[in-house]
Image: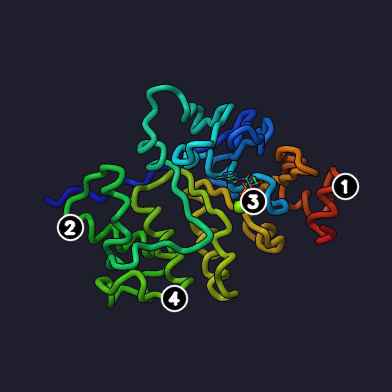
Amino acid sequence: MPPPAPSRSAPASLEARALSAWFGRRKVLDRVSLTMPAATVTALIGPSGCGKSTFLRMLNRMHESVPSAKLAGEVLLAGHDIYEPGERVTHTRKRIGMVFQKPNPFPAMSIADNVTAGLKLTGTRVSRSAKADLIERCLSRAGLWDEVKDRLSSPGSALSGGQQQRLCIARSLAVEPEVLLMDEPCSALDPTSTYRIEQTIHELAPEVTIVIVTHNMQQAARVSQQCAFFLASQGTPGVIVESGDTNQIFTNPGDERTADYVNGRF
Ligand code: ADP
Ligand code: MG
């Protein structure tokens, strides 16, 4: 009997507690705290340079490849600090996936191999028959299966930008993450591709906790249940000015700076 397909993991909550970040001696985030409940979409908004990407990257230890980066604070995944001594970074990355602004599939690798590439990196073992199921399931969840099912051995670079981004989402889903971090995933895409990615976010949200950075206020309003507004004024490190229910942030924000930002006044 073939082994069963790997089970889907449940979405987990993520909580940043008093996260501060430095590059060299420059502090870029100051004691930022945010709870991102399981199975919800949280949008991080705010002007360029206020630390949104830094915050997002620290949620899965990406900054550890930047020698000048330093962090203080805690990140609790389902209640456990990912920075606790002994926590393996590969284990964290398996549980918390990431999608970047610029689609970055492995260009020479086939579409199918792109989907399963993360399994090798995280040391996840899957039998050959389960692999075919996994490829179909991940490409379906990313809304790409129907478009590519007849050319799974074509290179990832043969796809359009929007398809490449959905391939990257499929790749991140292959290790069954509990959380998916997305840093401006639609900024490089046309409106139709953007719409497809938003649909995918809607479909994934009950199964995966999603944190998305976006400069598109309509997008934040469409996809998220919760919003956090980041700001770094006049050379001070980034902070969250306000966070809460997306409807409230857009219709009745508690801080004048949030109102100005979401209404396009800066
Ligand atoms: P955002 O995503 O909100 O635009 P970032 O998190 O990218 O902001 O950047 C926050 C601040 O940290 C900026 O001033 C940026 O120049 C600085 N920064 C980001 N990455 C690095 C790095 N690798 N080295 C030095 N400074 C950095
Ligand atoms: Mg950024």
Marks 1 and 4, how far apart at CA = 41 Å
Does 178 sit above or below residue 260? Answer: above
- Can you tell which of label 2 and label 1 is closer to the viewer? 1
- The residue at which mark 2 appears reads as 129
Q: Are marks 2 and 4 in contact (CB under 8 Å)?
A: no
Q: Residue at x 68, y 49 (%)?
A: 49
Marks 2 and 1, how far apart at CA = 56 Å
Tell me which numbered mark, 2 or 1, is placed earlier along the sequence.
Answer: 2
- The residue at which mark 1 appears reads as 256
Marks 3 and 2, how far apart at CA = 37 Å
Marks 3 and 1, how far apart at CA = 19 Å
Q: Residue at x 49, y 27 (%)?
A: 81
Marks 3 and 4, how far apart at CA = 26 Å
Please identify the quadrant where the C terminus is shown: bottom right
Q: Secondary structure at mark 2?
A: helix
- Mark identifier at residue 211: none
- The residue at which mark 3 appears reads as 43
